[in-house]
Amino acid sequence: MKVDFGKEAIAHTLAETLLAHPVVCLHGADALALTALAVTSVLDVAVRGRKTVYIACEGEWQVSATLARLGKARQLGQVKGLFVLSQSVDLLKARNVDNLAQMIARKVGRPDLLVLDCLAYCFGADELNPAAMDAFVAHLHRLQELTGARVLLLHRTGAAGVRGSRSTAEPPARLARIDLAGGASLAAAPPSAADDTMEPVPIGGTPVRRTRAHEHDKDTRVWTQ
């Protein structure tokens, strides 16, 4: 399914599409707009008291900044139930899919939404390779089945950019797709260093502080609200 709408209706369309389809691809050239729409879905999940896992492959800086802006508009002091993994994950490898699902189950339980930001950092092959893309889509559906979460995949289109984070390739077939209308991208601050911590993120953008007891085991560092 392919849905083309202007930005004024895209958030509503995204919410409805996520309800109707287990895996959805949101694509467009404006990376900040894609993240903003994904965060809008995160807030929708949070107000229902449900959990979201956000795979922020370029670090949580942009997610936190967007949360601060959109959360303030909704008069929210903190988003509970949001867990951010600031690390790229190659989901073209089946073992990575299983490992990620197991980590989510262990640390988060059963999330309502899983955001992958973005495709270029989760796809370890040429996006123009149809066999690899078919395998990737199959792995997305497996991840959805294992976690029980709706999967939202962000796909940046346009000219090739840093580390291939933008692509001229079409969005993956056999997925519900929403096209984000073009528009000028806003300037963004450079990303901070990423690590492999999955943690709740306050709207203000400051991660919950690590406690001394967790310093020796990065794999089990999880904070509950």
Image (cartoon, rainbow, N blue to C red):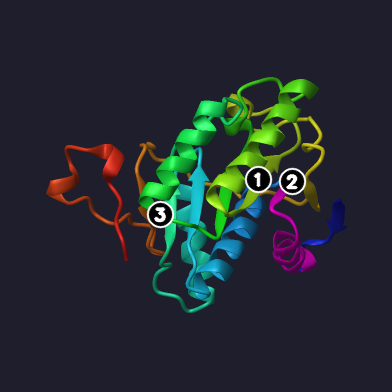
User: In the rendered structure, does residue 14 fall within the stretch colored magenta?
Assistant: yes
Q: Nearer the viewer, residue 190 or 155?
A: 155
Mark 1 secondary-structure assignment: strand
Q: Nearer the viewer, mark 1 or mark 2?
A: 1
In-image side of 2 versus 139 (left or right): right
Camera sees residue 171:
yes
Q: Amino acid at mark 1?
A: Leu
Camera sees residue 129:
no
Whichever of callouts 1 and 3 sits on the residue coming sooner in the sequence is 3
Instruction: Please name the residue shown 57% across and 50% down the image.
Output: 115
- Percent x, y of residue 216: 17, 37
- Residue at image mark 2: 27
Mark number displayed over residue 108 = 3
Which residue is situated farthest in the bottom direction here? 75
| Image-quadrant location for residue 94 | top right
| Image-quadrant location for residue 143 | top right
In-image side of 205 versus 153 (left or right): left
Which residue is situated farthest in the front direction here? 146
Whichever of callouts 2 and 3 sits on the residue coming sooner in the sequence is 2
- Percent x, y of residue 207: 32, 54
User: Which region of the structure is painted magenta?
Assistant: 9-28
Magenta region, mostly helix, strand or loop? helix
Instruction: Please name the residue shown 17% across and 51% down the image.
Output: 211
Mark 3 secondary-structure assignment: loop
- Residue at image mark 1: 153
